[in-house]
Image: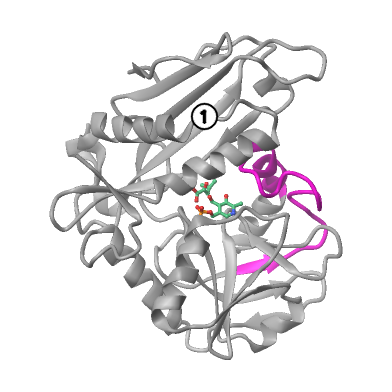
Amino acid sequence: MAQELDWGSLPFGYVKTDYNVRCYYRDGKWGPIEVSDSDTINIHMAATALHYGQEIFEGLKAFRGVDGKIRIFRLEENAKRMRSSAEGLLMQPLPEDIFREMCLKVVKLNERFVPPYGTGASLYIRPLEIGLSPRVGVKEADEYLFLMLVTPVGPYFKGGFQNTNICIMRGYDRVAPLGTGRFKCGGNYAASLASGKKAHDLGYSAVLFLDPKEKKYLDECGPANFYAIKDGKYITPASDSILPSITNMSLMDLCADMGIPVERRHITVDELESVSEAAACGTAAVCSPIGEIDDLDTGRKYVISKDGKPGPVTTEFYNRLNAIRLGECEDTHGWNTIVE
Ligand code: PLP
Ligand code: COI
């Protein structure tokens, strides 16, 4: 029961909530939004989602603000990215207005699971689309299920806003150079599990993947984008094989507000020697400061944080982002959708 949840110490995990919402694409059109209180789905054993990976998802968050109102962060951007993922995997894209309606509905229906203001927790919204049609030959489905589930979550990296260490391992890629890296499909995450487990077993919070073509440039950081602060500038990888992070995009806008120049470009591993801050950014990760980056192939250790504390720019990003999402300051960029 929601009342019994210990909001302040929620992990980033699944908690059963009251309802999820579903929409089916059949006979060439999207049907009505259906409400379900079951957390299982019944699909054909030969569905394309199961055999050929026609599965895409999203992740966004709703917050209880200082004024008691619930705000969803940048839902239009997630709707757009999900459309792009659908197109990338030859799936049926969900119109953005239905995405919005489903988001508002699923949050409203599960209002009692939106963590209270001040707990640091939020309601994670997970949109998911799967191909339903049975296929034995490799071919796209013509029927799809789009659903949204929600679950209250705490921080993604244990301990919340504090430094963690990450590592570089050239023996693994999560995506191919012109593959599915810029789409949010389950296959990318399946491909990251083995290296992620190895990194965790060695005490690292994530793998910093290199570009899969040349293994020369930084790509992204587990389930998050990467940025660093170098000579007072915000630098973040320009790459076709990473997910275009909405958090990263938002931080670049905050840089403009804060007068910090932004460079989206290739970043070599050696450059890590001269950065003053580094972090992983994403919906789940928010901006998670990185203390040290260990290159497990060369044995080099890049100590980013000299004092063991999150750097000033990352701390400012974290505070500004939270203040906007919690309604503590004006939403000058128009990023929040208030759930009425
Ligand atoms: N990169 C990957 C691989 C991710 O899974 C995520 C999380 O969604 C991100 C980056 C960050 O994207 P966003 O800030 O839109 O959550
Ligand atoms: C997110 O940040 O929303 C993610 O999708 C990361 C991970 C939990 C898959």
Mark 1 secondary-structure assignment: loop
Residue at position x 76%, y 76% in the image: 268
| Residues rendered magenta in the picture | 166-194
Image quadrant holding the N terminus, namely: top left
Image quadrant where residue 51 sits: top right
From this view, report whether residue 310 is shown above or below residue 166: below
Is 254 within the magenta? no
Q: Nearer the viewer, residue 197 or 250?
A: 250
Does the closest atom of ligand 1 sit within 8 Å of the Cβ of label 1? no
From this view, report whether residue 2 is shown above or below residue 248: above
From this view, report whether residue 229 is shown above or below residue 81: below
Residue 146 x/y as whole percent: 50, 25
Residue 174 x/y as whole percent: 73, 50
Residue indicated by mark 1: 94
Residue at position x 41%, y 33% in the image: 97
Is 177 within the magenta? yes
Q: Is residue 214 left or right of residue 259?
A: right
Residue at position x 65%, y 61% in the image: 220
